[in-house]
Image: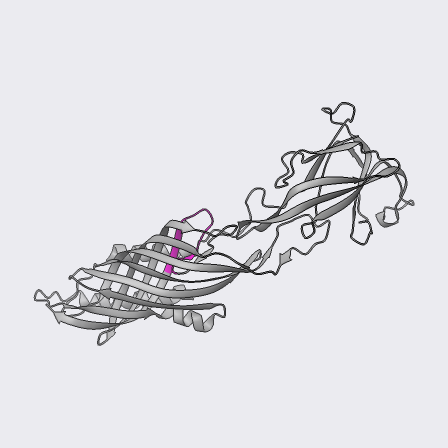
Amino acid sequence: MKKIITILVFLLLTISCEKDDICTTPNADTAHLVIRFYDYNNQDTPKEVTNLLIVGILDNGDLISDGIVSTRDSIAIPLRILENNTSFILTTDTVIDDQGTTDISDDTITSGNSDNIVLNYENEELFISKACGFKNIFNNVNLDLVPDADNWISDSNVVNNKIENENNAHIHIFH
Amino acid sequence: MRTYIFFISLFLSFASFAQEEVVKDSSKTHKFGLRVGTDISKLVKSAVIKDYTAFEINADYNFSKKYSLAGEFGNEKRTIDEPQVNFTTEGSYFKIGIDYNAYENWLDMENAIFVGLRYGLSSYKHTLNSYSILNTDFYWDENRLINDAINYDSSTTHWLELIVGIKAEIFNNLYLGINAQLKNYVGNEAPDNFANLYIPGFGKTIEDSKWGVGFGYTVSYFIPFYKK
């Protein structure tokens, strides 16, 4: 009889010790698009883009004002999860006039070569767990370069058209 | 709150054992029959909690002095609101098994301190009312809460359950009982792109675990068939 009561009390204690509902699953967050830049003339060699500025374009044509200029050979950029396309302007050799202030909203680009890229894809919502909810996966990703008089991007290659993690580059851009 | 009520009832039952164990009667007679009842905690929770409706009928038949054939049948509908998902689960379940009564009754009482095993089967459906897409990058400033309901295909879960509890006669043939259940599922069929986060009759599930726990507070009536 005592044993049974011991088991009863033990069971009572276990119910109050539920695993905390905190999202700890690896790769539960929606992944960024990872682009790596390569030399157009020597396509196995990564090549940095000098003073690269990345800015997103809203549907009404407005640009998102935040952007940091940096020289790098790879970028990870967010795609829109509620739309089937996302547009960015990638500017190389950017020179910014900050008007002598630290406020970035009045900054103007004084020189640089801007190319407009459009990413098209299909969204898939994947259930992860109760604590994490769903993540978005981008399927059948492709990149369109809007032609202009002087494109600094020479070519691109989608190496992985399914974006579900950020372990490897999804797109190679040659310049 | 639930825990306090349980401990109070546990002490009450201790008090009654203390009295009864003084007397040892060798010329005992036993009543055999069917005890039928309901889980009052489910009725109370249905009345008090807005997003919960449940009903359970339980029965046991003492085919020998120590063993009973026991089972439960019920229906549950519950909405769970978590930060990332809000869903409603609705379905029916039954459990069948054997109870072993470890309590020595005197005269013709049928009190029980029992331990039992059950096989449980639940069939149910989930509706996802709203959900969030996890995206910690706020660059595009998109709303991540999706309000389109998703109806999933039905799910089935089978489990084995250890149940321990007490049934005490409070009036003539009317019994009040408490029990605790420890469950482990042996088969769990989840719909595509969701998980069985709640299972009627089994309870909440824990990530990466097959274990579940439950409690019951029963009121039941004993229908005597014969004495021996």
Figure colour scheme = one colour
Establish if A154 lies above or below B107: above
Q: Is residue B35 visible?
A: yes
Depth check, front residue: B94 or A74: B94
Tell whether B6 sits left or right of A126.
left
Q: Quadrant of the N terminus of chain B?
A: bottom left
* Quarter-of-image position of residue B200: bottom left
Establish if B172 lies above or below B180: below
Depth check, front residue: B172 or B187: B187
Question: At 54% across and 52% down in the image, what residue appears?
Answer: A131
Q: Position of residue A31 (x, y in %)?
A: 64, 43
Q: Quadrant of the C terminus of chain B?
A: bottom left
Establish if A17 lies above or below A140: below
Depth check, front residue: B140 or A40: A40
Magenta region includes residue A158: no
Q: Position of residue A39 (x, y in %)?
A: 77, 26
* Residue placed furthest toward the left: B27
* Residue placed furthest toward the top: A42
Establish if B159 lies above or below A163: below
* Residue placed furthest toward the bottom: B172
| Mark count | 0
Q: Position of residue B58 (x, y in %)?
A: 30, 66
Q: Is residue B7 visible?
A: no
Magenta region includes residue B202: yes
Q: Position of residue A43 (x, y in %)?
A: 74, 25
Tell whether B214 sits left or right of A136.
left
Depth check, front residue: A76 or A170: A170
Span shown in magenta: B201-214
